[in-house]
């Protein structure tokens, strides 16, 4: 595939938000001896937040603000008023402590041997920095819709991201597990890759179990995406360069050493 960079959606595609937020709800509820369907409540929370932020242009709030305000609604609607203000703050902050899906870090490292790879997300900058550090994720750059002032799937978000990368949209592969994101990117000229995340919404299953037929690549995991984009022979190319350089440096040193060793050996053999 003829591309020059990769842009990766982060919430859901890279981060297992459902498990992290559900555990936070369950622990807080357990402290108050509350029994609820925490899977369902977590997904309700996510849907409310997405509905509030998707497609926004020039909002006076970011996704952290949305998470806090939507949490207040979830608490009221699901009978969780026993949660203290401190506990609610910790719940809202659980988004900053999410874990990445286990297949991502190694695949990212492999893709970066050949391409710049950036996070392109609706999540705020502070959250992206926090989860990247927590999961040892080394991006080449982070682009948040918060920085642009327009949120996916608004075309302005994709076109501005491409401009900041100093590339044409056609030079960039957009990777996500959401068709709405990929469809909008494709309409702006990006190439697209659908990475399945069947557990993104927990037992409920994802809203997009299958890829749109116009996706350029469809994979079940990031390991397969990395293999498709960077075959092992491409990964070994930098190693071959290092070995060749190492050999050129050592040869002038090793030749006199070998000659000296032969001379010394000859002196002991009449």
Image (cartoon, rainbow, N blue to C red):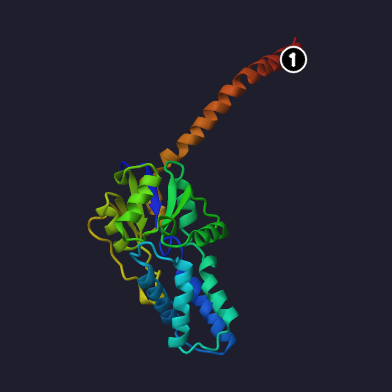
Residue 31 occupies which quadrant of the picture? bottom right
Q: What kind of element bears circle 1?
A: helix
In this view of the protein, which residue sits in the foreground, 59 or 223? 59
20 horizontally vs 263: left or right: left
Percent x, y of residue 134: 57, 60
98 horizontally vs 148: left or right: right
Name the quadrant of the N terminus.
top left
In this view of the protein, which residue sits in the foreground, 220 or 150? 150
Please name the residue shown 58% across and 84% down the image. 84
11 horizontally vs 194: left or right: right
Percent x, y of residue 66: 44, 71
In this view of the protein, which residue sits in the foreground, 117 or 216? 117
Farthest residue to the right: give it: 268
In this rendering, the answer to whether 205 lies above or below 78 is above
State how many labels appear: 1
In this rendering, the answer to whether 167 lies above or below 180 is above
In this view of the protein, which residue sits in the foreground, 126 or 247? 126
Farthest residue to the left: give it: 213
In this rendering, the answer to whether 188 lies above or below 28 is above
Percent x, y of residue 112: 46, 45
Percent x, y of residue 68: 49, 74
Residue 210 occupies which quadrant of the picture? bottom left
Name the quadrant of the C terminus.
top right
Q: Residues within 10 Å of mark 1 (few under 14, many from 20)?
A: few
Please name the residue shown 34% across and 70% down the image. 206
Please name the residue shown 27% across and 52% down the image. 188
Residue at the disc numbered 1: 264
């Amino acid at each position: 595939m003829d591309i020059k960079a990769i842009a990766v959606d982060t919430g859901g595609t890279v981060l297992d938000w459902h498990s992290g937020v559900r555990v936070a709800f369950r622990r807080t509820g357990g402290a108050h001896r509350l029994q609820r369907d925490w899977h369902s409540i977590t997904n309700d929370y996510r849907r409310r937040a997405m509905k509030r932020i998707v497609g926004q242009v020039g909002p006076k709030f970011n996704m952290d603000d949305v998470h806090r305000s939507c949490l207040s609604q979830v608490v009221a609607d699901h009978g969780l008023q026993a949660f203290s203000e401190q506990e609610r703050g910790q719940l809202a902050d659980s988004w900053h402590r999410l874990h990445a899906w286990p297949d991502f870090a190694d695949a990212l490292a492999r893709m970066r041997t050949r391409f710049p790879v950036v996070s392109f997300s609706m999540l705020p900058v502070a959250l992206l920095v926090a989860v990247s550090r927590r999961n040892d994720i080394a991006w080449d750059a982070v682009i948040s819709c918060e920085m642009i002032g327009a949120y996916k799937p608004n075309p302005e978000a994709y076109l501005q991201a491409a401009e900041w990368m100093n590339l044409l949209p056609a030079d960039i592969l957009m990777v996500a597990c959401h068709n709405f994101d990929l469809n909008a990117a494709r309409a702006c000229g990006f190439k697209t890759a659908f990475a399945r995340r069947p557990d993104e919404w927990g037992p409920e299953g994802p809203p997009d179990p299958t890829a749109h037929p116009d996706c350029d690549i469809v994979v079940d995991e990031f390991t397969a995406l990395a293999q498709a984009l960077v075959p092992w022979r491409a990964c070994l190319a930098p190693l071959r360069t290092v070995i060749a350089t190492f050999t050129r440096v050592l040869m002038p040193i090793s030749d006199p050493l070998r000659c000296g060793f032969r001379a010394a050996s000859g002196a002991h053999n009449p």
